[in-house]
């Protein structure tokens, strides 16, 4: 398994282009199942998750062609016919969002058998809201041997659906299914994340009738069929935020390009409060940090437009070196502090309290050590910490990172970071060569 080696202490200078969003790309790929015509996704990130979902879609009969065009990397997905509506455990367990093929398969064919999902181990992450929403749309759902068996032989039908709490995945899942339902569906308490808007707009370009995406009430008038389209994947706000925090941690001056600054507004406010100098342009964000120490700032994760849970670990890394004590509250997932013991190996001072709260007391320095990446964003947090730690940090188990960050070493080393990938089982003693 690959590892990342970092030599901390070098300020970053340069441009970092932000890729298309993983969390949008994978839903858009699933949405392509809703039509027999080709869907061309541009500004596509090439990630372990997009590759894995591609393999799953191929099992259903999707033909996939990858190329490069005017809007970056492209993936053409074409499913003239669903040849199988079976999503096996081995593929679905590796990535939570692959469960979202259930709705499109069901809407298009009237039946599907999909394994219960896996994904980052940051909480129990049940799929009850997904299944209740599909049932409300008229699906008959059975579960046995770890599989969901769904049937709607006469098609799905529109319904009024109130989510008891906000779920990004359940909103996206039910939204896709509702596009082909008979009649009108209204979702209340829907998620408002930018990736939902991206999905809804792409579905509309395919001929769906979705309105209200980006607000808590989404209305979908079902249509008989959808057509193909070309769609540019929205920028990855989590990747953008991660590099903004990396620049703040390492010092120097970094300009993020191909980004929509308004999507990371809350993060940038928190970084300004901490003492970073931040300027935004139409599609750029510049982060500058001088030699002084940053100030401790508190954060609480919330649904969009609040502070993103997917940036909590990376922000905590920044706070480990800030002046004072900061409180980090995690309200979305019940087990998303797995990075804390790993940051402690680097010398951070953090105590986790009951109820999803961590107190971070800034220390004068971090020192390089071997650490273990436990999930995707935790991996990014360890990379950020390693950029400032004295000496060498080795991040083990980087396959998590490869799920969601395209060419991370390339992007950071282009700005002067001393970072490299150690392939496979390179012995630790060879690391200093
Ligand atoms: C692939 C993808 O887009 N992943 C993102 C998505 O995950 P995901 O879609 O899994 O996140 P949700 O918004 O659904 O989860 C929010 C909370 O609801 C709970 N829940 C969810 C569904 C359900 O049926 N029952 C239930 O109890 C979850 O356990 C969690 O505690 O949104 C999260 C919150 O912004 C992000 O951290 C993830 O990066
Ligand atoms: C938690 C994440 O991914 P997933 O939902 O696929 O596990 C993430 O992107 O941070």
Image (cartoon, helix red, strand yellow):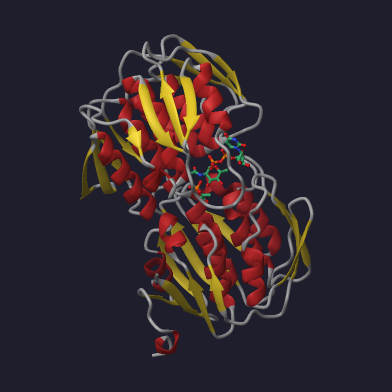
Residue at screen point 54% across, 66% down: 246
Q: As displayed, is residue 346 above or below residue 351?
A: below
Tell me which residue sits at (62%, 48%) in the image.
123
Whether residue 40 is visible: no
Figure check: 286 above or below 215? below
What percent of the width, then of the height, locates residue 181?
41, 15
Q: Quadrant of the C terminus?
A: bottom left
Q: Nearer the viewer, residue 182 or 55?
A: 55
**Location of residue 368 in the rendering, given as x and y in whole percent from the top left corner:** 57, 81
Q: How many numbered dots are placed on residues in this image?
A: 0
Q: Is residue 62 above or below residue 409?
A: above
Between 420 and 354, which is closer to the camera in this rendering? 354
Residue name at image x 63 percent, y 77 percent = 346
Q: Is residue 134 left or right of residue 294?
A: left
Q: x and y percent of residue 315 in the render? A: 63, 60
Q: Is residue 322 visible?
A: yes
Farthest residue toward the front? 145
Residue 214, compared with residue 426, is above or below; it is above
Q: Foreground: 69 or 329?
A: 329
Left or right, 130 with respect to 67, comes to: right
**Image region (quadrant) for ligand 1:** top right
| Quadrant position of the N terminus in the picture | bottom left
User: x, y percentage for residue 179?
Assistant: 40, 20
Give left or right: position of 321 versus 71.
right
What residue is shown at x 67% (from left), y 48% (from top)? Answer: 334
């Amino acid at each position: 398994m690959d590892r990342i080696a970092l030599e901390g202490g070098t300020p970053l200078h340069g441009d970092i282009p932000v890729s298309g969003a993983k969390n949008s790309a994978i839903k858009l790929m699933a949405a392509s199942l809703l039509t027999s015509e080709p869907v061309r996704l541009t500004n596509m990130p090439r990630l372990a998750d997009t590759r894995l979902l591609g393999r799953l879609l191929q099992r259903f009969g999707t033909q996939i062609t990858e190329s490069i065009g005017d809007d970056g990397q492209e993936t053409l997905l074409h499913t003239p016919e669903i040849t199988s509506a079976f999503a096996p455990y081995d593929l679905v367990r590796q990535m939570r969002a692959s469960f979202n093929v259930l709705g499109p398969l069901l809407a298009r064919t009237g039946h599907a058998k999909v394994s219960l999902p896996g994904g980052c181990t940051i909480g129990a992450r049940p799929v009850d809201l997904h299944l209740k929403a599909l049932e409300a749309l008229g699906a008959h759902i059975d579960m046995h041997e770890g599989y969901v068996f769904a049937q709607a032989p006469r098609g799905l039908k529109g319904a009024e659906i109130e989510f008891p709490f906000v779920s990004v995945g359940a909103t996206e899942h039910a939204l896709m299914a509702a596009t082909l339902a008979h009649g009108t569906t209204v979702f209340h308490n829907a998620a408002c994340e930018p990736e939902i808007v991206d999905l809804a707009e792409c579905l509309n370009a395919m001929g769906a009738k979705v309105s209200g995406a980006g607000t808590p009430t989404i209305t979908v008038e079902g249509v008989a069929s959808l057509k193909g389209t070309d769609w540019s994947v929205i920028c990855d706000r989590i990747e953008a935020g991660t590099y903004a925090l990396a620049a703040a941690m390492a010092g120097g001056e970094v300009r993020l390009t191909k980004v929509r600054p308004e999507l990371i507004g809350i993060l940038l406010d928190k970084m300004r409060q901490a003492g970073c100098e931040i300027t935004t342009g139409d599609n750029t964000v510049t982060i500058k940090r001088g030699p002084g120490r940053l100030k401790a700032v508190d954060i609480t994760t919330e649904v969009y437009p609040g502070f993103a849970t997917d940036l909590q670990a990376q922000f905590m890394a920044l706070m480990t070196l800030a002046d004072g004590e900061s409180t980090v509250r995690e309200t979305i997932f019940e087990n998303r502090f797995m990075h804390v013991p790993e940051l402690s190996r680097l010398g951070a001072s953090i105590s986790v309290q009951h109820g999803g709260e961590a107190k971070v007391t800034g220390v004068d320095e971090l020192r390089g050590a071997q650490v273990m990446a436990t999930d995707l964003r935790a991996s990014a947090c360890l990379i950020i910490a390693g950029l400032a730690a004295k000496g060498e940090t080795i991040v083990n188990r980087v396959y998590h990172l490869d799920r969601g960050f395209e060419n991370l070493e390339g992007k950071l080393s282009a700005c002067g970071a001393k970072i490299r990938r150690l392939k496979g089982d390179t012995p630790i003693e060879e690391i200093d060569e």
